[in-house]
Amino acid sequence: MTATGAVLFAAGPAGPAGPAGRILAAEQVTSSIAWPWAIAVVLVVVAAAGGLAWYFARNPTIKPTEEAVWVANSDYVEQIPEFRSWVRRYRGLQWAGIAAIALGALASAFIAARPVDIAVSNSKLATRDIVLCLDVSGSMIEYDMEMVDVFAELVDSFEGERIALSIFNSTSRTVFPLTDDYALVRDELEAAKEALDPEVLYSEDNDLIDKYLLFSAGTMGTMEGSSLIGDGLANCAMQFDESETERSRSIVLATDNEIMGTPIYTLQEAVDFTQERGIAINGLYGAGDFGPDAQYAGEYKDAIEGAGGRYYYSDDPTAVDEMVKEVQAQQAVDLDATPEVTSTDKAGPWFAWVLVAVVGLVLVQWRLRE
């Protein structure tokens, strides 16, 4: 007695340490009976008990000390309509009691046999990794919130990919490492959006300032410069683990390319570094209130497109869709995982039928006693 069904699902998050991203599995569900022989055992026992009860009911034993009392001229009683109606009700209640016992026995037999759902998940582990790389220097504050909105839209379009967020100014800080815990990712991006409110530049609200300082902590580890884009990008390239595993790796870099100071890596050197590590890169350019600086924008665009990446302005309405397509176009290697077999007891409606049978039998017995 089986029934099957299939469903494609994404299992729960593996957490930041999970090496291969969210589990994507084709699950085959089979309904079955764990102990089918128990049905026969219960029904045979009930049938034997019923047979014995029927036999003794048909062959009553009268003790020697008891005598049957016969009433003369009582044949006419069977012809009285009220008596015949009473007999019919009595027989009907008896048959109802038998039906309740049979229903209860059958339902109990199936419960004893343990109906179960057996789920076999043939899992594949997704292997796309994306690092969101955000410049949080002073010149980016005016449109960092817009960049975070773009990141959030990207995350909403992904399923199975691992995401990381790294922020940088003169030094870098990892907000969260590669993870497929999308709830955590969305919470952190929401916190980033609150902390990177451009009002912080003009506000005297201590809470707002504290949020920004707390979020950007660790990005001003040196006073030798700020907005060191090449160093920030190189650090983002180092976020990818599983270096010996064939994986799809991408960086989404958001910056205005306004460098102040002398970085260890120039932007072009950092882009070359990502290419050496087999990492694809796409760029978001933040446009300020007075429009983009042509020199900064041109250098940034040339570096990104020279590496085969896509370059977008932060307010480009096509940016999210195009970057999602770009990431998904990369070949993702699926790693086979050991099939998972899960057995779940599923009594289904049988408990309800047992309850119905018991209630019915109690009502029948109550009526018979009347």
Image (tube, rainbow, N blue to C red):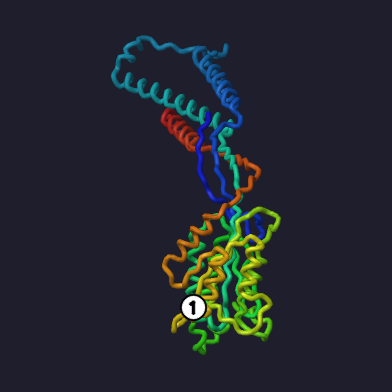
Quarter of image, res 224: bottom right
Instruction: Looking at the picture, tell me which residue is in the foreground, 319 or 134.
Output: 319
Q: Is residue 42 above or below residue 205?
A: above
Structural crowding at the residue carrying mark 1, measured as other residues with C-alpha within 10 Å and reported as few (<14), some (14–19) or many (≥20): many
Q: Position of residue 282 (x, y in %)?
A: 54, 66
- At x 59%, y 59%, the residue is 162
Instruction: Looking at the picture, tell me which residue is in the foreground, 358 or 149.
Output: 149
Quarter of image, res 222: bottom right
Q: Position of 32 compared to 93: left or right? A: right
Q: Is residue 254 above or below residue 20?
A: below
Instruction: Looking at the picture, tell me which residue is in the foreground, 218 or 276.
Output: 276
* Residue 179 visible in the shown view: yes
Q: Is residue 85 above or below residue 195?
A: above
Dot 1 lies on which element? helix
List the single residue furthest toward the right: 244
Instruction: Looking at the picture, tell me which residue is in the foreground, 200 or 275.
Output: 275
Q: Position of residue 71 (x, y in %)?
A: 40, 12
